[in-house]
Image: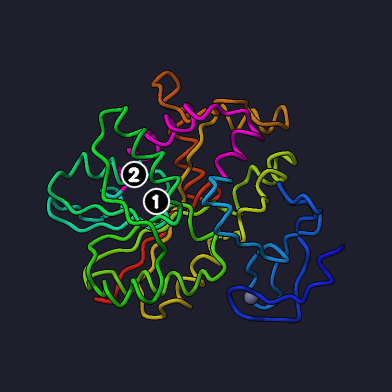
Amino acid sequence: MQGKSYSFSCLICGNKDKYTPVQETILGDQKGEMIAVECGECAHTQLFPPQYDVAFYESDGQVNNVVKHYGTPQKTLFDHSFIEARRRRERFGDRGIRLSENMKLLDIGGGYGFFGGEMARSFPNAEITVLEPSQTRTEIGAVQMAENGIRPPQFQVGVLDQDFADRNRGVFDIVTMWHVLEHVPDPVGLLNLAMQIVKPDGALCVEVPNLHDDTIMLSEAFRNRSFMEEHVSYFSPATLRSTALRADRDAAVELYGYQRYGIFNYFHWIHFNKPQGASPDLFEGQDRFWLEAHWRTEKERRLTSDALFMVMRHPA
Ligand SMILES: [Zn+2]
């Protein structure tokens, strides 16, 4: 194991001694020197050595990898992003998050800004801002939205740092991070900054992939695709919650399962032990609604869904 030539340090608790390897191959790791390990102190799972390279995102590297590894056309990725954005908006109501006509919402690491566009479309009087480090992505997103007749949100190229937090303390009704936390070198620090810019009665909404997705146990191919160079951290329900409480020990934390992909995609991974192909099932039809609904509800209830959705609020 080549990871041994680096000194280990847990991204969450700082432990430098005890860790256990949990995955020997990492998708996209050209040099073959990365593994994934579980911290012996706090059980957080992370890449070792961790990699974080903003230049990779500026060049749209992760999206290019999806196109490369799955053969998914960019058009399908955009279509799926619009579906995902709509579902994210619809989900707020299910989780007791109040959306108002004149709210201020910040989407951190919002990529092409499709979620921001969806919110701007649904709430024309709200102030919707997408904070995204990649200028390239914001430009691609603006073009895509214009072509689909969607008014783009406000884009700000940058990251959430202390300077941004100082200038925007307690400003936002809702702050969102959709599949961002697993990419960053300091998840505790990022959540702490995000809570600083949430209004006293506002909410921070975080979605990440779920390390306890049962497909990881049922398909070796899925497991091997789940560990990738882009994801520094791999959160379980327990480690996501404890990370949130390290960031803000007074926060009220709610954790939910959320299943993004459909049951046909799940069957395909298990039966064929390979990806479903260029256009994975997101289930937009009605034909198997009873089956899909039951399966999703159960996966989410058991927290073995493909994603976790967390809401953090300031104490009442
Ligand atoms: Zn740790």
Residue 135: % across, % down: 42, 50
Element type at marker 2?
helix
Query: Which is the main secondary structure of the residues drawn in magenta?
Result: helix
Query: Could you classify mark 2 by the number of other residues whose Cα lies within 10 Å: few (under 14), some (14-19), or many (20 or more)?
Result: many
Q: Give the residues in magenta.
A: 62-91
Inspect the image, locate mark 1, and give the three-letter code of the amino acid beneath it: Gly
The answer to whether 179 appears left or right of 53 in the picture is left
Residue nearest the observer in this picture, 91 or 110: 110
Q: Which mark is residue 110?
A: 1
Residue 208 colored in magenta in the image: no
Q: Is residue 193 left or right of residue 90?
A: right
| Labelled pair 2, 1 in contact (Cβ < 8 Å) | yes
- Disc 2 to disc 1, C-alpha distance: 7 Å
Across and down, in percent, residue 221 comes to 73, 39
Quadrant (top left, top right, bottom left, bottom right) of the C terminus: bottom left
Mark 1 within 8 Å of ligand 1, using the beta carbon? no
Q: Nearer the viewer, residue 292 or 269?
A: 269
**Which disc number belongs to residue 115?**
2
Q: Secondary structure at mark 1?
A: loop
User: Does residue 85 belong to the magenta stretch?
Assistant: yes
